């Protein structure tokens, strides 16, 4: 198309030059070209095609630019949305973390009442002291022979020996049964052999050899423990004087000595009496024990260690109650699982409970040391009396006789 256009222009120029050569005398005149077939038929269509092509290119470029812009907007929107979602996720995670920390710090477990039975410790201790005061005169003892021995006034050593022999008939051992079984002093082997002569009646509860220790005594084990106390700490040094005898000067002196002996005898028996009282089932432990068993780890330890008397009555002695509180943490593997699940303030609470329990047990040790010091002082007084009394009596006799030393 371009070659044809050039050829037409060249032909037109040649014709013009030829005309000018033929008419040299002609004057130059302005020519106004109104139309040209080559231009109209060849140049203009070509220009229109070029214009159309350029329009299509422009349109394509416009659409491409629009698409690029829209794609950029979509990418920007996606990035913005992603950033927003990330911020929301971060905020949610931070909020959840704060809530979890708050829960650990301020939320108490459902079993808060069962985490420690310390709320009833004072009541249990008081109930034990009350039980000791009853037992000293035979209260709470089911055996008539043991109860009468504890409740009666002092008798002669010979009569006291008869009473001990009669009581021992209920605690005959296998060796004694082989020796004199079938007599009034030993009808046969007792279910609680040696209950009135072996210290395990105080420590583990009377029973056959090899039995599992019981920290909460049955009524029969209480009778055996009190019989042991009577044999070891309540020796009969002399009988109580009659009404006529006590009105004499000798009777009054005798009663004074007997009163002093009974005071020493009470101190000697107190430690054993406290042990028996601390082994009695107490109603004060029932509610605390029920609450403590709501914790699965405590229930597991209870089923493993509770004595038969406790499982039957639902009441523990002070000794077993203390052992349960200590053991269900230290000697209980199920509690270790609970401890591992604790964190934050709940863990601090558990540590505080353990420290408080240790303080309570330490206070008990302090009180027992005080009692031991009292007994040591009484032993010192007896030793001093044994040393000084003969010398004082000798000097008193000399003073009465009017003897003077040079």
Image (cartoon, rainbow, N blue to C red):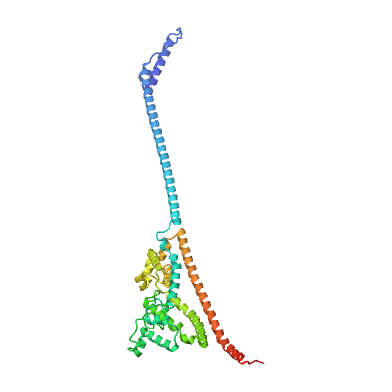
Where residue 109 sits: x, y (%)?
A: 41, 59
Where residue 206 sits: x, y (%)?
A: 38, 79
The reply, left or right, for residue 394 in relation to residue 4 is: right
At horizontal 42% and vertical 77% (from top left) the residue drawn is 135
The reply, left or right, for residue 372 in relation to residue 146 is: right
Occupied quadrant, residue 189: bottom left
Q: Is residue 280 above or below residue 384?
A: above
Q: Is residue 338 visible?
A: yes
Where residue 394 sits: x, y (%)?
A: 59, 90
At horizontal 49% and vertical 79% (from top left) the residue drawn is 267
Occupied quadrant, residue 142: bottom left
Q: Nearer the viewer, residue 297 or 203?
A: 203
Occupied quadrant, residue 163: bottom left
Where residue 137 sits: x, y (%)?
A: 43, 78
Q: Nearer the viewer, residue 202 or 39?
A: 202
Quarter occupied by the C terminus: bottom right
Q: How many marks?
A: 0
The reply, left or right, for residue 351 in relation to residue 181 is: right
At horizontal 53% and vertical 82% (from top left) the residue drawn is 379
Q: Is residue 209 visible?
A: no
Q: In the image as oriented, which residue stretches furthest toward the right? A: 406
Quarter occupied by the N terminus: top left
Q: Nearer the viewer, residue 69 or 339?
A: 339
Q: Is residue 279 above or below residue 240?
A: above
Q: Nearer the viewer, residue 355 or 164?
A: 164
Q: In the image as oriented, which residue stretches furthest toward the top? A: 25
């Amino acid at each position: 198309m371009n070659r044809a256009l050039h050829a037409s222009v060249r032909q037109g120029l040649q014709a013009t030059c030829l005309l000018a050569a033929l008419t040299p005398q002609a004057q130059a005149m302005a020519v106004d070209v109104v139309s040209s077939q080559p231009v109209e038929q060849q140049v203009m269509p070509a220009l229109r095609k070029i214009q159309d092509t350029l329009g299509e290119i422009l349109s394509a470029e416009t659409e491409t630019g629009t698409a690029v812009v829209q794609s950029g907007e979509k990418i920007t929107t996606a990035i913005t949305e992603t950033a927003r979602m990330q911020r929301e996720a971060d905020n949610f995670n931070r909020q959840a973390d704060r809530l979890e920390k708050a829960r650990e710090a301020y939320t108490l477990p459902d079993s808060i009442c069962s985490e420690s039975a310390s709320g009833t410790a004072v009541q249990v201790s008081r109930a034990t002291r009350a039980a000791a005061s009853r037992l000293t005169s035979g209260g709470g003892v089911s055996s008539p022979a043991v109860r009468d021995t504890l409740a009666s006034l002092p008798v002669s050593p010979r009569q006291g020996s008869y009473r001990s022999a009669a009581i021992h008939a209920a605690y005959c051992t296998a060796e004694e049964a082989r020796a004199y079984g079938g007599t009034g002093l030993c009808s046969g082997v007792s279910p609680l052999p040696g209950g009135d002569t072996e210290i395990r009646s105080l420590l583990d509860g009377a029973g056959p050899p090899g039995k599992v220790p019981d920290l909460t005594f049955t009524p029969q084990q209480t009778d055996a423990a009190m019989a042991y106390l009577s044999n070891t700490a309540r020796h009969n040094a002399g009988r109580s004087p009659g009404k006529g005898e006590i009105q004499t000067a000798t009777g009054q002196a005798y009663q004074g000595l007997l009163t002093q002996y009974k005071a020493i005898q009470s101190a000697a028996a107190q430690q054993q009496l406290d042990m028996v009282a601390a082994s009695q089932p107490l109603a004060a432990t029932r509610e605390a024990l029920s609450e403590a068993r709501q914790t699965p780890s405590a229930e597991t330890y209870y089923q493993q260690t509770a004595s038969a008397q406790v499982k039957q009555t639902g009441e523990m002695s002070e000794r077993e109650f203390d052992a349960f509180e200590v053991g269900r943490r230290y000697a209980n593997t199920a509690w270790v699982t609970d401890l591992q699940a604790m964190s934050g303030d709940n863990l601090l609470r558990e540590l505080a409970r353990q420290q408080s329990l240790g303080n309570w047990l330490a206070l008990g040790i302090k009180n027992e040391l005080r009692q031991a010091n009292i007994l040591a002082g009484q032993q010192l007084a007896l030793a001093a009396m044994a040393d000084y009394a003969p010398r004082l009596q000798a000097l008193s006799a000399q003073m009465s006789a009017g003897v003077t030393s040079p």
